[in-house]
Image: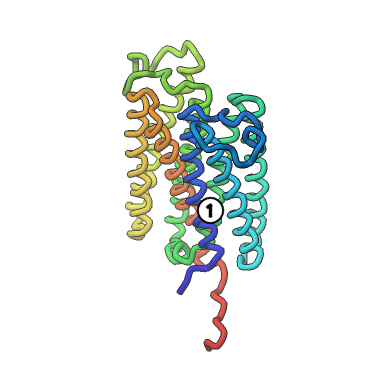
Amino acid sequence: MARPRLYISLAVTVAWTLALLFLGSVVHATESSLACPDWPTCFGTMMPEMVGGVFWEHLHRLVAGGLILLFGLATWFATRDADRRWMVRASVAGVVLLLVQAVFGGLTVIYQLPDAISTTHLALAFIFLSLAVVLTTAASRRSAQIVPTDPRLRGILRRWGGGATALVFLQSVVGAVVRHTDAGLACPDFPTCLGSWVPPIETHFVAVHFTHRVLGVLATLAVIGLVVALVRAGASTTLRRRALGAVSIVLVQFTLGVVSVLTILSVLPVSLHTLGAAALLALLVHLTALGHLEGEPVAAARPTAGVV
């Protein structure tokens, strides 16, 4: 049976958003954020010469525009296919969120990368990703089949999953502050920071960077706690594998963070580190959503003409 168009459009939206977050990190890491000095045009045109930093910055804008169109289509499908009214309202809210985020993207250029606006721009992207993942999970027939009925398992997904999600989101936002305040090398060594496990907090750069590391440890412990709790509660193989997938991403994230520091913020590890944070957040949001959703499909399959 073909997957419903609502689910397909939402799943593509999630993948597109992850790609956009990766591309945005490339833009920043290559110092291309102001390659187009105006907005929404680039050097007064919508089709500038795609060379140097303009290539990355304008490509980022084009992909962002594509995301708005794609999610707009998904929202239209939701108004026709979803049998849960909250999904329609959430989809409309998602469109508004994307438009607001686009405005913040424009403000970062107009005001030449102020830290607060740039960080808000990235934080809104993570919020939209989380919303898209919730909608995708709710629209998936496969997810409906693995939603646990055991109240204990549902409670674990809500508490441990929700806690881990909150920590990863907070760490990601702090990571955005690290990125946009150029604090990535405030602690140039690892695993210590300035030669100490608890460095002297003499500047806000060190404070932000060290906070990012501490939150990383707490988030890791929360993800491990989620896995242990699911295993002890007798969760299905599918749930355990997805939770273990989060642990795997944490390990990759840890490695990329170390490599980013040791390579003095090289473009590829830094950009993959952002992508890893987004992927981890998406997976944890998915697991948490499974603890809140009912085990039933979003919409019944529509009969095909001529088939009884």
**Vertical order, 132 against 256 (above or below):** below
Residue 209: x %, y % from top left: 45, 23
* Residue at screen point 37% across, 50% down: 243
Residue 71 drawn at (x, y percent): 60, 54
Locate the N terminus by quadrant: bottom left
Q: Residue furthest front?
A: 49
Does residue 39 lie above or below 193 as drawn? below
Q: Which residue in the structure is indicated by mark 1?
A: 13
Total marks placed? 1
**In terms of image quadrants, where is residue 63?**
top right
Q: Is residue 73 above or below residue 188?
A: below
Of the residues shown, which amino acid type is indicated by label 1?
Answer: Thr
Instruction: Residue 286 in the image: state x and y as whole percent.
Output: 47, 52
Quick one: label 1, few (<14), some, or many (20+) residues within 10 Å? many
Residue visible at 46% across and 58% down in the picture: 151
Helix, strand or loop at disc 1?
Answer: helix
Residue at 40% across / 31% down in the picture?
A: 267
Color theme of the render? rainbow
Where residue 247 sits, quadrant-wise, is top left
